[in-house]
Each structure stands twice: as structure tokens, then as C-alpha cells.
Image: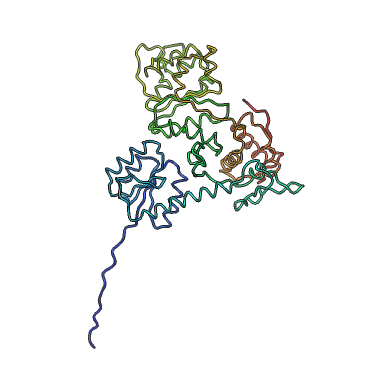
Amino acid sequence: MQPVSVNILPAPPRIRPRTALVASADRSFRQRLVQILSGLRWQVREAEGGAEAWAEAESSPVEAVIVDSWLPDLDVAEFLKDFRGSFPQVDLVTASGSSPEEGPRGPYRQELLYAMRRSQDTDTAAWNTAPALGAGSADRVPPPAPGHEAGVIFPFPDGTAPGAAAALAAPRPGPVRMAAAARNEPSASERLPELIGNAPCMIEVSRRVRLVAPRNTPVLIEGPTGSGKELVAEALHRLSARSRNPFVAINCAAIPEALLEAELFGHTRGAFTGAVQGRTGRIESADGGTLFLDEIGEMPLSLQSKLLRFVECGELQRVGDNESVKVDVRILAATHRSLADDAQKGSFRSDLYYRLAVFLIRTPSLAEHPQDLPLLVNHFLQQLGREMPVKRLDEGAAAKLAAHDWPGNVRELEHVLERGVILAGDEPVLTGAEIDFGRAVN
């Protein structure tokens, strides 16, 4: 038998999967692109800011980088220019689909642009199908998620269901990303995850936070009690270059006047009766980070002058100490009062007001954005359901919430829902009987 010759073909070369890097502080935006690009056989890595994206690109090669229109730590234009200089072969695309003029266009650019369009189309569809609070009885209520059928809103006896009640009970879409209908209209893509609400006034708060967060500019946050001023302060810190350093908050109204100075500036041993040892003040403990002065309008006038000196020169003196200490902090202040009016009346130092109010952010009352009530209810019920099945509302509970004027704002809503969940016990649905407003605390 003649030997049979067999031609052994060499194994095909192993092809390294294409890798894209998505740089954005918006987690939902990153997740959508990851899902779409993965379906196109891309490996996708994520970065929350410019510095992290740069480090990712240095640690392992990438074919493409998609950069959001805003970065929390770096100016986008400068980042694109510097990144292009260091990684000239990377296909660099912004969230709008454009790229620096001098940059090369990779062979897979069309796939990247397709993924961008798909992610934006998904957002627009979610936005258009979302029920609006108070939109009327003709609103179509989406079906509940699996496992939540017990919370379906049934029509009232006359066969209609009010839009507010239907919207409150319906599952809500997550954060959306879509272009503004007009140039002067705030875009929902700017909404920060911790600031729940798609009303224009809430988007404006997020827009202002994004604009000022990367700077060291002092910010004054004004708004009614319970409207989320501390959440705004935390977002300003999170999106700043100081985010890895301390965020120190102090409520100026909660500490007795006699102790507030020592609490803020610290004290030496024996500085006053009971000072058996020295202590670092809140300002000094925030060195390198952010100091949040809540209810700054309640600070005594005598202490305002000492705070003014620190704001002007960045130096402080501990109580009982003659030496000054240099401290680098960014100051954020909040109040439920109008400090401008207080400054005119003389109850607040005008020079300190102008130092603190370099940039103003106003948090709206819940009555100013009632269309966000469904989103807020869903958010709090999800939070309250972390250790148990998430409860839902019947039509009576939803209508009762929609009719309330919310003098205590978002904080009151959170407490009312927590009280209702406790009163409902093991029942999966909150009824009107469990919605107890009690006495709102302003």
C-alpha cells in the first residue's frame, strides 16, 4: 500500500478581539454602549473620567476610545488633544460622533457610530413611552415587571384611571440620554444619578453642578428644607478633582454657639474648661478635600468674621493657639434662607455672603416639579425593598400621594413611604390606608 501524504495546514492565527474604551461619568451611558458594542464582537472597557481612561489606554492597547461630551476631571477638548498626541493610532470618537480633525479614522468607525446611534435611539424610545404625571386618563400604563403583578393599578369604578395614579404605580424607565428639543432647553443627558427627576428645573441643577464641579469656586446652595441640598454638595465633591480626599460636612444649626468655633477651627489642650486634649477642627480635617457648611445662615455673626478670614486667606487659628495653620479646602455652603435678604438686613455679613455666593445653585421644592413624583416614588420603594420584596402602590395610595402638596419636599416623601412600608407589614401592596402624612416638619 502506497503511503498517503497528508497536508497539514497551519492553524489560523489567533485574532485579538477589537477593544474599545468608553470614558464617561454616566454609568447608564457606558452600560448601553457596552451592551451594543459587545453584540458587535467588541471587548469594552470602562472609565469614569479622563485620567482613568488615560491609565486604561496605557495599561493595555485599545483600537477605539469613545469620550463623553463632559468629563468630571478634565476638560474634554484638552483631553482629546493630549490623548491624540500620545495615542495617534487610536480611533478617537466623541459622544456626538465627531473626532479631532487631525485624528485618523479607524476601519471600524462605522460600527462605533452605529453603536452611538443605537444607544441614543434607545433613550429616545424610553423617553417617549414614559407616562407623564397628570397627563390625563388616556395615558397608557406599561405592564408591571415580572413578580410585581400585585401592584397593577385597576380602573376606578367609573372605568377611568387618573394619569397621576397610573404614572405613580407604573414601572419607570431608568435615566435617559437624549438631545434637547431646543438649544435653550436643558438636556436629560446632564442629569446626575443622585438627583432624581427629569423636570427642567432638576436638569438645570445637574447642569450647574457639572459646570462648576471641576473648579475650586465656592458654591452656595439655596433651597427649601428637604429638597436635597446635601446631595448636591456630595455630587459637587464627587465630580471634582478633590473626590479622593475628605468630604467633611457640619450642620451649623445643630451645634451650640459656644462649641461651634472649636468644632470648626479645632482647639489646643486647656483652651477652655473641659479641653483636656487638643483636637483638630472640621476645617483642618477637610484639608485637600471639600468642607460643606450646612445651614450657614444660622452661624453667629461673631463666628462669621473668623470664617471670613479663613475664606480670604486659607489660614486658621485653633482656639487657644497663636499660630496660623494653612489649609486647602473648597467651601460649599447651604441654607434654606435667602442669604441675600439676610445680608441686606444685617443678620448675615454681606462680605462673607459675596465670598460664599460666587456660584449659586438652587434646589427646587417638590411642588415645582410634581412630574418627577413617579420617579421619586419608584426610587424610594426600590431602596426600601433592598431587604424584602419591593412593595407597590394601589390606585388609592397613588392618588393620595399625587394630591398632597409636600411641604417637607423630597425628604417628607421618603419618610411617608418608609412609614407606609412599615404599616403595610407583609402585604405586597401599599393602599391609601398606609399613606399617613402625619405632621410635616419644615
Q: Is residue 70 above or below residue 109?
A: above
Residue 118 % position (x, y):
46, 52
Residue 34 % position (x, y):
43, 51
Q: Quadrant of the C terminus?
A: top right
Q: Residue at x 32, y 42 (%)?
A: 54
Q: Is residue 121 above or below residue 233?
A: below
Q: Nearer the viewer, residue 270 or 339?
A: 339
Q: How is the image coloured?
A: rainbow
Residue 415 % position (x, y):
62, 34
Horizontally, residue 86 falls left or right of residue 132, namely left
Q: Quadrant of the N terminus?
A: bottom left
Q: How many marks?
A: 0
Q: Is residue 159 above or below residue 289?
A: below
Q: Nearer the viewer, residue 313 or 386?
A: 313
Q: Residue at x 52, y 43 (%)?
A: 175
Q: Residue at x 35, y 41 (%)?
A: 52
